[in-house]
Amino acid sequence: MGNSIERVTIGGYNQMEDKERKSQKIVVKPLIRRPRGRSELHGLCCQRNHRFMSFGLNSSPDDPGWVCNGSPDGFACISGVRDVDDTRGMHRWRCNECDLDLCAACFAAYSGFSNADIVVPSCRRGHLMLPLETSRPNDWTCSMSHHRGCRNGLTTPNLSRAFDRWRCEVCDYDLCEACAFDPLPEMVAVKEQVSLLHALPPPVQPVWAPVHQMQAPVSYSPPPFQPPLPAPLQAPVQGPASSVLARKTQRLDYPEPEMASSPSKRMLSRLAASSPLKADFVKLMPSSSEDDDIGYHTSLAVADDEDSEQLQMQFGSPRLSPCSLPAHPVENGMAVRMVFDAKGGRRVIWFTTKPLGMMYCCIRPIKITGFRQGSVAQSAGVQKGWILTHVGDRRILEMRFRDAQSIILAAVNKLPEKRSS
């Protein structure tokens, strides 16, 4: 029959064989792309430059449902979506003009972000928040306005219509994007204290029962004696004393989460099993022995951990100016912050003089391939094979090389020349 529809299976995806469905499946790969020069998590557009919008969770029984239009490989959806029933309760990204839908896992894959690159804020109780963007624009205010004040000043519902929204349904907690990625310093201190108590368990102490219990008959069973809890432990402070950062914690080795059935679930498992805050002290690193002799430092390094931005938040805002850090050696207030993805973790280095003298490949990721003679970067500890991911507060890992190179050059050109001995 001419109107009969045959169902076939392609890569685990039940796809209708009619021409309309086949053509839509074929064009979904070139239609979805990342906008030129964009590096935000939500910066995903179709080929017609329509931005994918977040429609939140689909849980209404009256909603006809939706089907994910596939993963970047052109076959099965990463989340395993096969029909409309599989998308109940899933986060939906949609382009209304082109009638394209993506689940959260496929959206992240098209965006080019790996599991380690995706950052999901949490509420005060630790629940992961959902990115609703502007899909529910009415009747919400930033919850941070009731505490220290919203960064965007969203104190009334009529002011929040055009701002992206992050929400915790469990706690009825809403944040604008600026406040969602700028946690309170006291929240960091709580994480630090919890990490310290778990990393340093109290020692086992002998417990002596009272004399009258020791002389009691054998049949008598006294209640279990609970020793009093010891006072909170404090790790020794290394380096100069600081009223802002008074403790040093250790990173816990959490077991790797079990492999889930799909990449999207594995991504959520890694987020749920993320290790606590690792804090360290800011320390000065001389660029060379000559500079050390004259007491002039050309760089300032922050502890090598992926929570370096959270570490900086203990001194104020994560977008603070470099000269506001304590014990900063710069006289003219000029410095450039660079973040490198090294083999053993992340390295955050402040450069205060030039020339950096780094040689890097002309395609992304921007990998360090060598150094020129008299390089400030090499004397500051940068090594071959490191990948440059951030300059200042801007992410360059996913940018085109031309755009990323312009950011690097513009930042470095402001630095003064290195002093000669």
Image: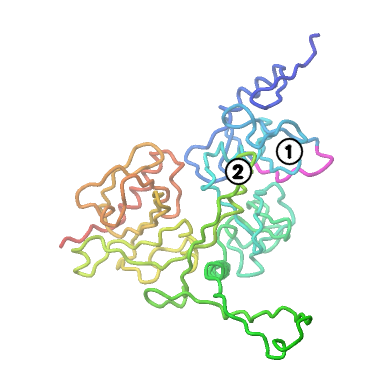
Which comes before the other along the chain, label 2 or label 1?
1
Instruction: Please identify, in this view, whether the residue under mark 2 or under mark 1 is nearer the observer.
Output: 2
Which residue is at a point 39% across and 67% down the rendered structure image? Answer: 282
Q: Quick one: 105 or 259, which is closer to the camera?
A: 259
* Residues in magenta, as a range: 53-63
The residue that disc 1 covers is 87
Query: Is label 1 in a helix, a strand or a loop?
Result: helix
**Dot 1 alpha-carbon crowd within 10 angstroms: few under 14, some 14 to 19, many 20 or more:** many
Q: Residue furthest left?
A: 421
Query: Is label 2 in a helix, a strand or a loop?
Result: loop
Quarter of the picture containing the C terminus is bottom left
User: Which circle marks residue 104 in the picture?
Assistant: none
The answer to if 320 sits in the magenta stretch is no
Residue 79 horizontal/vertical position (percent): 66, 37
**317 up-or-down from 60: above or below:** below
Residue 229 horizontal/vertical position (percent): 62, 79
Which three-letter amino acid code belongs to the residue tagged 2? Met
**226 up-or-down from 392: above or below:** below
Q: Quick one: 247 or 236, which is closer to the camera?
A: 236
Residue 362 horizontal/vertical position (percent): 35, 37
The answer to if 56 sits in the magenta stretch is yes
Which residue is at a point 69% across and 56% down the rendered structure image? Answer: 168
Q: Where, by quadrant of the figure, is residue 419 drawn?
A: bottom left
Quarter of the picture containing the N terminus is top right
Q: Where, by quadrant of the figure, is residue 59 drawn?
A: top right
The residue that disc 2 covers is 259
Give how far apart the Cα atoms at labels 2 and 1 are.
Answer: 22 Å
